[in-house]
Image (cartoon, rainbow, N blue to C red):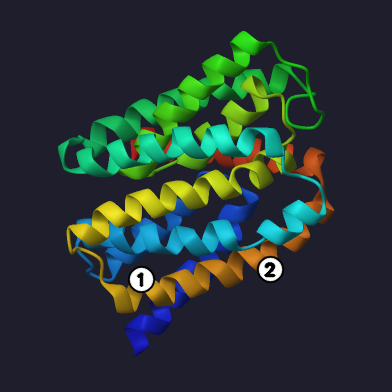
Amino acid sequence: MQELFIVFLIGLVGAGIGSFVSGTVSVLTIAALLTLGIPPIATLGIYRVGIFGFQLGGLKDYAKSKNIEWSLVVPLSIIGAVGAGIGALLVVHFSEELLEKIIGLVILLFIPFTLLNKKLGTEVQVVSKNRTLFGHVCYFLSSIWSGSISIATGIFVSYTMLYFYGLTLLQAKGTSKIPGLVKAVVATGVFAFSGIILWDKAIVFFLGMLLGTWISTKYIIKLGNEWLRWITLFAIVLLALRLIFL
């Protein structure tokens, strides 16, 4: 019972922080679950179920505040489902250590774009069809990673939506909710079929993630895009350094 309560708290706190800073929820929660002695593959299974709670939490608030770009929901859901399925099937073949370092380097490259373009993430921008199409490719690749190890996926998704789709930070968070749920269904299905999900811990983790996201979303919407931009910038520097050097 004590272990289940700790799993709930990990989901609650991880989702609360991760809702503010994209890409941190996986780093925080997966690392914390591993410290409980849960095997890595089982930890990923628990995380898959928890993502349902993370994506469901706050969905109504984002829709109510009109921060969901509905025209992108269906194509991203389809792209994300295929990518997540591939990632979940290939998870055992990845070199996690090498990929984490590569991701850390790529994330650092995002920082100059954020500093040079002050409107990125704070104002809606008009983008070309070619840029949008290339964004679909990037989203597909991030979905493969999301279906496997998941570390820092949120940052890739956010920057894809900001740069290639011209969305604000709040719109990026809101728009990614439903495609995120679809990806979670596919990836969880693969893990469940393989019989590697510890359901008692997974359900408790789901409840923690759901509550944590629901609470934090209300504050995120009040903060606005400008504050979120600086919070995100600060966090991705720390995350990138952690992925590269630790």
Question: What amino acid is labelled 2 in the image?
Answer: Ile
Tell me where residue 99 appears, x and y as whole percent.
Answer: 30, 31
Q: Quadrant of the C terminus?
A: top left
Q: Is residue 120 above or below residue 62?
A: above
Residue at x 64%, y 33% (from the top left corner):
72
Q: Is residue 52 visible?
A: yes
Q: How many marks?
A: 2
Query: According to the image, label 1 marks what residue?
Result: 202
Disc 2: CA contacts within 10 A as few (<14), some (14-19) or many (>=20): some
Q: Nearer the viewer, mark 1 or mark 2?
A: 1
Tell me where residue 240 appears, x and y as whole percent.
Answer: 46, 34
Give the Cα separation between the discs numbered 1 and 2: 20 Å
Disc 1: CA contacts within 10 A as few (<14), some (14-19) or many (>=20): many
Residue 115 in the figure: left or right of residue 212 = right
Query: According to the image, label 2 marks what residue?
Result: 215
Tell me where residue 212 appears, x and y as whole percent.
Answer: 59, 68
